[in-house]
Image (cartoon, grey):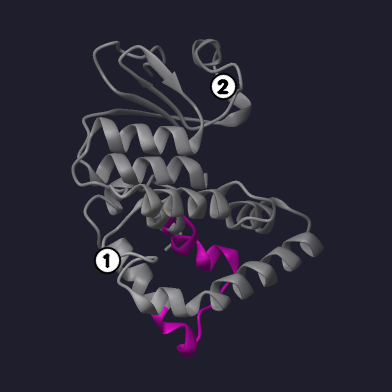
Amino acid sequence: MQLKPNPASTTLYSASQELESHAVRFIMAHKSIEREVVELAFDEMPEEVLELNPCETLPTLFDRGMVLYDLSVIMEYLDERFPFPPLLPVDPIEKAEKRLLVYRFTRADSCWYELTKTILNGAKKEADVARKALNGSLLELLPLFAHQPYFKSETMTLVDVCIAPILWRLDILGISLNEKAKPIQDYANRLFEKEGFHDSLTFAEKDFG
């Protein structure tokens, strides 16, 4: 397995089942970026990768001799470096709103990514609490899922890219959407049908949906 990145290529070091890695793989596949994707385990990070990213986090992106390893930084870099199709609006107010939503869903305290990881990896009591919280939060935002084709947008943005990995995992999270939540399921199906989504799935993730 090639671990040291080729300086002439775009290389993504990715965890096979983690939300952040899935989101970045979705962007890269959606934009048809020529890439090398290397799957790694957090507890088996080789020295070659640790030299690139001393924070020991995945995903880690290597491109043009530069190393990036924060989810939001990676996503925005890819969107600017490969601008078609765009995943952030041009208007600064709308762009700021999308950035805030990405923060709210992926990095804020008790965010959806944190709740998802607790459901999958936490003790049963903690997982049950997190599952109830995530389910309630999804239903609370039901009007926003129904209002426009994408989350507060007519076109797909980085916000949707971040939400898609969660919705793809609802079955293994033990969350069932009832008939009242049909707008969320319809929204999820729109994301799953987008160019590149299925190409972004690892072998393990294909069994989630």
Residue depicted at 43% across the width and 45% down the height: 22
Residue at 31%, 62% in the rendered image = 192
Question: Residue 190, relative to residue 63: is it above or below?
Answer: below
**What numbered label is drawn on residue 45?**
2
Q: In which quarter of the image is residue 152?
A: bottom left
User: Which span of residues is magenta-colored?
Assistant: 164-183
The 10 Å Cα crowd at callout 1, few under 14, some 14 to 19, many 20 or more, is: few
**Front position in the image: 124 or 73:** 73
6 vs 174, left or right, is left
Residue 15 makes an appearance in the image = no
Task: Where is residue 201? Give x, y as percent.
Answer: 36, 48
In the image, taking residue 1 as reference, residue 101 lies left or right, namely right
The residue located at (75%, 67%) in the rendering is 129
Q: Residue at horizontal 42%, vertical 53%?
A: 98
Establish if 74 lies above or below 178. above
Determine whether, in the image, residue 21 is placed left or right of residue 155. right
| Residue 65, magenta (yes or no) | no
Query: What's the residue type where badge 1 is placed?
Result: Glu
Tell me the chief SS of the magenta region: helix
Above-or-below relation of 100 to 135:
above
